[in-house]
Image: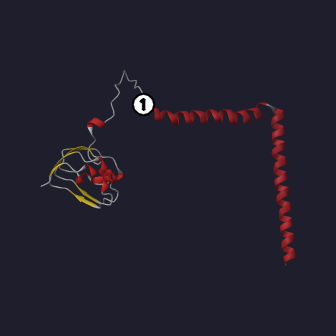
């Protein structure tokens, strides 16, 4: 038979584990300080006259909608969306949608991929294209690769010979 609103300072009870305020005549909004209660494992606010948006917190949104049922004025996760918090809809002008501020984040990946493609074209084709076009550079490049391959093979062979000698000496 409780009446009135939930006290604003309820969030100071940070170690509160269970809260059952069901089947009362509580009205007004759920206090924002309730989102500060971090050990709340059971919540029942059913069948009251609560209204407004459920405060945002991982704790309060983790409960089922049944914890808030019977409060026709409540909205927000996990219940229906609040109408006053919906983003404004941009009118469609002849099939051309204008970007809003929220769409700015969509262009960041686009610029990244454009810059990556330009970098690939300049880097890869700058080297590969010059080797295709300029015959003397192409010959020098393949001579360098051949010498490098020979040096790696020689180094590996010498290391194998040294390893075989060390193993023979230990026997």
**Looking at the image, is 157 positioned above or below residue 140?**
below
Q: Quadrant of residue 92?
A: top left
**Looking at the image, is 112 positioned above or below residue 61?**
above
- Colour scheme of this structure image? secondary structure
Other residues around mark 1 within 10 Å, as few (<14) / some (14–19) / many (≥20): few
Would you say 94 lies left or right of 110 here? left
| Extreme-bottom residue of the structure | 171
Residue bearing mark 1 = 101
Name the residue: 31% across, 55% down. 12
Name the residue: 80% across, 31% down. 134
Q: Nearer the viewer, residue 158 or 61?
A: 61
Would you say 100 lies left or right of 171 here? left
For the C terminus, which image quadrant? bottom right
- On the image, the x and y values in percent for residue 60 come to 31, 52
- On the image, the x and y values in percent for residue 161 come to 86, 65
Name the residue: 83% across, 73% down. 167
Q: Secondary structure at mark 1?
A: helix
For the N terminus, which image quadrant? bottom left
Q: Nearer the viewer, residue 90 or 26?
A: 26
Name the residue: 87% across, 70% down. 165
- On the image, the x and y values in percent for residue 57 come to 34, 49
Would you say 52 lies left or right of 24 here? right
| Extreme-top residue of the structure | 94
- On the image, the x and y values in percent for residue 125 come to 70, 34
Count of marks, rendered view: 1
Q: Nearer the viewer, residue 97 or 22?
A: 22
């Amino acid at each position: 038979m409780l009446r009135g609103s939930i006290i604003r300072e309820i969030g100071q009870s940070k170690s509160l584990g269970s809260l059952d305020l069901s089947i009362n005549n509580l009205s007004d909004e759920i206090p924002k300080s309730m989102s500060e209660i971090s050990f709340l494992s059971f919540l029942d606010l059913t069948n009251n006259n609560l209204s407004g948006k459920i405060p945002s917190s991982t704790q309060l949104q983790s409960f089922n909608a049944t914890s808030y049922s019977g409060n026709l004025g409540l909205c927000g996760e996990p219940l229906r969306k609040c109408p006053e918090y919906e983003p404004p809809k941009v009118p469609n002008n002849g099939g051309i949608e204008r970007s809003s501020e929220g769409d700015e984040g969509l262009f960041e990946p686009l610029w990244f991929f454009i810059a990556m493609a330009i970098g690939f074209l300049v880097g890869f084709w700058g080297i590969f294209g010059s080797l295709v076009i300029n015959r003397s550079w192409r010959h020098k490049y393949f001579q360098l690769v051949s010498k490098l391959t020979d040096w790696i093979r020689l180094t590996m062979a010498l290391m194998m010979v040294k390893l075989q000698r060390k193993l023979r000496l230990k026997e």
